[in-house]
Image: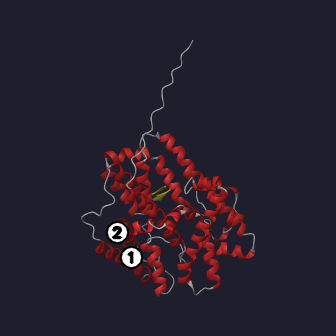
Amino acid sequence: MHIVYKAPAPAVVQPARLDPLLSQKLRFWSLVAMLMLVYVHAYNLHPRYLQPFTPVDEPLAVGTFLQYLLANGLLRFRIPILFAISGYLFAHHDAGTPHRERVKRRLRTLLVPYLLWSLLGLLFTWALEQHPYSRQLVQQASLSIFGPENAFVSGYSSGQLLLRWLLAPVPFQLWFLRSLLVLNLAYPALRWVLDRAPAVYFAVAGLLWLTDFNVLLVEGNGLLFFALGVWLRRRDKEVLLQPRWFRLLPFALLWLGLVGLKTWLAFYYEHPPFFPMTLLHRAAELLGVVVMWFGSNGLVRAAMRRRWFVWLTGFSFMIYALHVPLVNYATEAVLGRWPEQQLLTFLLLPLAVVALAVLLGAGLRRVAPAAYGVLTGGRGL
């Protein structure tokens, strides 16, 4: 008789509970950053594609200045803060579960939604192309990576369809999920470096972020701020109390001043200087993270006491996944009818898109919670 001995599975060590205010703050910014994202992607001046040094072809006016100030200035800290939150939470749950199991879970929460929403973006665009009016909206939105001569999904080859599905989605905001998955896969190596040589890592990552490094599946933003979140959690750094050196009003005024200067340069120069614009952009990103994180405790407490706001936080991912390309096509439709209402379109259309995302999310969660769970990676259930 053979006696088979089975070793007991190692006990999974549960992470310590997050501080209640910190937990609320993470939920608050997960929603607010998504709202900011919709506004950035609703930018309707020309050229539409925003980079740190993007100029403005429109005449300088209150409305055009305000759009650029917000979309390519004050709201740009949203991606760094989301990466930092993601890194902090991933490190917080690094407590006994094998990395392989965590990766399997991340495939369900990141890869599956990425593939599904990318496919839905292709199908939605293809459907719009079947009607002459909406086909024109697709063409005007210029979301094709293959240029105006190949503007329509219905004209893609099989290879181009595969590329757009897997690597360059029509819902272009999905790059964040892709980058996050790569960083999660690389977490053991990242943790090892941050534990042993954080100064070297952050010097290199900071340079890549400053130069807007973006090669294949790796982005400088993620390399710096995801790692910052990991490092803060692993070193158990205080992230709620304001540092002694922080003063809200001077930092906020400096942030606003840098963004205002950058916005003025975008209008003043036909081709704004690359390095000054990039430095102003990066400095504003950092200041935005610092000002809004350390200066928002009162706002977070007030918002998270509202039941309706807490309810809305359950739909952060739906807002994120659904708003592009919808907001782009809707912008073309609205401005085609009211071309002089650029500022009003910028201010109000994102609210309509957010409302639609929340309503669809709430309806789907109620009628088909299993499908909702697959589409959102289990978020908001």
Residue count near mark 1 (Cα–Cα under 10 Å), binned few <14, some 14–19, many ≥20:
many
Q: Is residue 253 above or below residue 10?
A: below
Q: Residue at x 36, y 77 (%)?
A: 256
Seen from the viewer's position, the closer of residues 358 and 210 is 358
Query: Taking the image as drawn, is residue 34 in sight?
Result: no
- Horizontal and vertical percent for residue 317? 55, 61
Q: Which residue is mark 2?
A: 295
Task: Identify the amino acid type marked 2.
Answer: Gly
Element assignment for label 1: helix
Q: Is residue 6 above or below residue 45?
A: above
Q: Residue at x 44, y 50 (%)?
A: 90
- Horizontal and vertical percent for residue 223? 42, 55
Q: Which tag is nearer the camera, tag 1 or tag 2?
A: 2
Q: Quadrant of residue 287?
A: bottom left
The residue sitting at the top extreme is: 1
Mark nearer the N terminus (1 vs 2): 1
Q: Which residue is mark 1?
A: 259
Q: Is residue 365 left or right of residue 222?
A: right
